[in-house]
C-alpha cells in the first residue's frame, strides 16, 4: 500500500474529495497557495513590515542584515517594507483591471453577440482600439489624465475590453443557435431573460480563466508604466518604481532590484499557474482526457 492509499483509507469522504482535487489539480493548488501568501503579506503589511516611505540617508545602501532583511535603497529606505507594500498596489491594479475589463467586456460581448444589428459598428470600434499597442495607449491616457493609481487602472482596462468582448461574443454566437435557446425564444421569453438565464452561464468558465491572464498582464503593465515614469506616482512604493529607482545601483547594490523583481516574477507565475489549472479543470474535454 502506498502512502497516498494509506491516507485515503483513513480519511472521511469529504477529506477524500479534497485530496482528490489536490492530486488532480496541482497547478491550481500551487498557484493559489502562492497567490494567497502574497495577498496575506499585502493585507498584513503594517504588522510585518516597517514604514516604506521614511528615509534615513545614514542607512543608505546597506546590505541585508538582521536590522534590514533585504537591505536599504539609495535613500536609506527599507527594501523589505517597500517590497511588501508594493504588493498592495500590484494586486489592487491586477484585480481591479481584471474585474473592470470582465464586466465591460461581458456587457459588450453579450449585446454584440445577440443583437446582430449593432454588432458590426461596435466590433469595428473595438478593433480600432485593439490596433493601438496597449502600452502606448496607457501612456497616452496617463499623460492626459495625470498620474495616479485610478488613472493607471483605467488606462489598462481600456485595451483589455476588446479582447474580453471578442471572447464573450464568440461564445454567444455559438450558444444562441442551440436548441434550448431556440426553445426559450419560441416560448416567448424576452431577450434579457434568455441572455441572463441561458447564455450567460456558458461564458463563466472561459471568463474565469481569462480574468487570471488579464490580472497577470495588468500587473506587468503597471510595473512597466512605473518603470518608464508614466505609471503610479513615485511616492507610492511599487515594484516598478523600485526597479526604476534601483537600476543605477545594480552593480553596487543588487539587493535593491532583486527583491521587487523576484516578487513581480513570483506573483505573475502564481497567477498564470492558477489560470492554467482552472483552464484544465473547467474544460470538460481536458478533464475527461486527464
Image (tube, grey):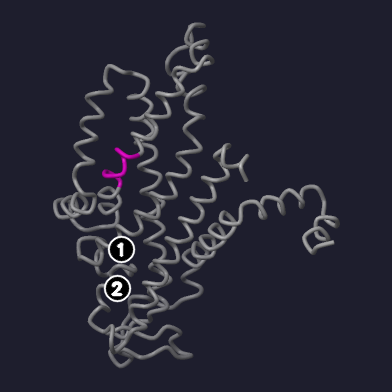
Q: Is residue 44 left or right of residue 162?
A: right
Q: What residue occupies the far bottom of the structure in this picture?
A: 58
- The answer to whether residue 86 is above or below residue 204 is below
Q: Residue at x 17, y 51 (%)?
A: 145
Lower sequence index among marks 1 and 2: 1
Q: Residue at x 39, y 40 (%)?
A: 102
Between residues 53 and 214, which one lies in front from this camera angle? 214
- The answer to whether residue 275 is above or below residue 288 is below
Q: In the image, which residues are magenta?
A: 157-163
Q: Return the residue at label 2.
A: 243
Q: Looking at the rendered structure, which numbered label has been put on residue 31?
A: none
Q: Position of residue 247 (x, y in %)?
A: 25, 78
**Marks 1 and 2 close (CB-CB < 8 Å):** yes
- The answer to whether residue 278 is above or below residue 230 is above
Secondary structure of residue under mark 1:
helix
Q: Position of residue 107 (x, y in %)?
A: 36, 30
Q: Return the residue at label 1.
A: 223
Q: Residue at x 21, y 32 (%)?
A: 125
- Marks 1 and 2 sit apart, C-alpha to C-alpha, by 9 Å
Q: Quadrant of residue 283?
A: top right
Q: Quadrant of the N terminus?
A: bottom right
Between residues 158 and 203, which one lies in front from this camera angle? 203
Q: Residue at x 77, y 48 (%)?
A: 14
Residue 186 is one of the magenta-drawn residues: no
Q: What residue occupies the far front of the structure in this picture?
A: 289
Amino acid at each position: 500500500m502506498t502512502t497516498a492509499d494509506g491516507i485515503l483509507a483513513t480519511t472521511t469522504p469529504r477529506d477524500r474529495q479534497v485530496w482528490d482535487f489536490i492530486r488532480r489539480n496541482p497547478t491550481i493548488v500551487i498557484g493559489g497557495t502562492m497567490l494567497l501568501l502574497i495577498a496575506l503579506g499585502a493585507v498584513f503589511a503594517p504588522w510585518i513590515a516597517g514604514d516604506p516611505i521614511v528615509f534615513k540617508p545614514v542607512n543608505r545602501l546597506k546590505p541585508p542584515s538582521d536590522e534590514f532583511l533585504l537591505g536599504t535603497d539609495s535613500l536609506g529606505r527599507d527594501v523589505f517594507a517597500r517590497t511588501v507594500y508594493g504588493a498592495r498596489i500590484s494586486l489592487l491594479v491586477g484585480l481591479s483591471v481584471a474585474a473592470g475589463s470582465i464586466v465591460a467586456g461581458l456587457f459588450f460581448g453579450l449585446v454584440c453577440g445577440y443583437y446582430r444589428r449593432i454588432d458590426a459598428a461596435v466590433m469595428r470600434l473595438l478593433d480600432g482600439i485593439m490596433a493601438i499597442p496597449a502600452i502606448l495607449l496607457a501612456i497616452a491616457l496617463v499623460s492626459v489624465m495625470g498620474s495616479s493609481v485610478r488613472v493607471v487602472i483605467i488606462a489598462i482596462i481600456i485595451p483589455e475590453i476588446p479582447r474580453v468582448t471578442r471572447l464573450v461574443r464568440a461564445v454567444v454566437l455559438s450558444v444562441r443557435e442551440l436548441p434550448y435557446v431556440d426553445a426559450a425564444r419560441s416560448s416567448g421569453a424576452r431577450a434579457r431573460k434568455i441572455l441572463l438565464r441561458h447564455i450567460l452561464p456558458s461564458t463563466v468558465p472561459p471568463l474565469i480563466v481569462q480574468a487570471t491572464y488579464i490580472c497577470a498582464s495588468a500587473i506587468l503593465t503597471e510595473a512597466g508604466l512605473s518603470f518608464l515614469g508614466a505609471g503610479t506616482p513615485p511616492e507610492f512604493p511599487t515594484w516598478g518604481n523600485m526597479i526604476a529607482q534601483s537600476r543605477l545601483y545594480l552593480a553596487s547594490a543588487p539587493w535593491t532590484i532583486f527583491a521587487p523583481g523576484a516578487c513581480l516574477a513570483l506573483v505573475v507565475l502564481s497567477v498564470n499557474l492558477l489560470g492554467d489549472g482552472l483552464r484544465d479543470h473547467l474544460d470538460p474535454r481536458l478533464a475527461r482526457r486527464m
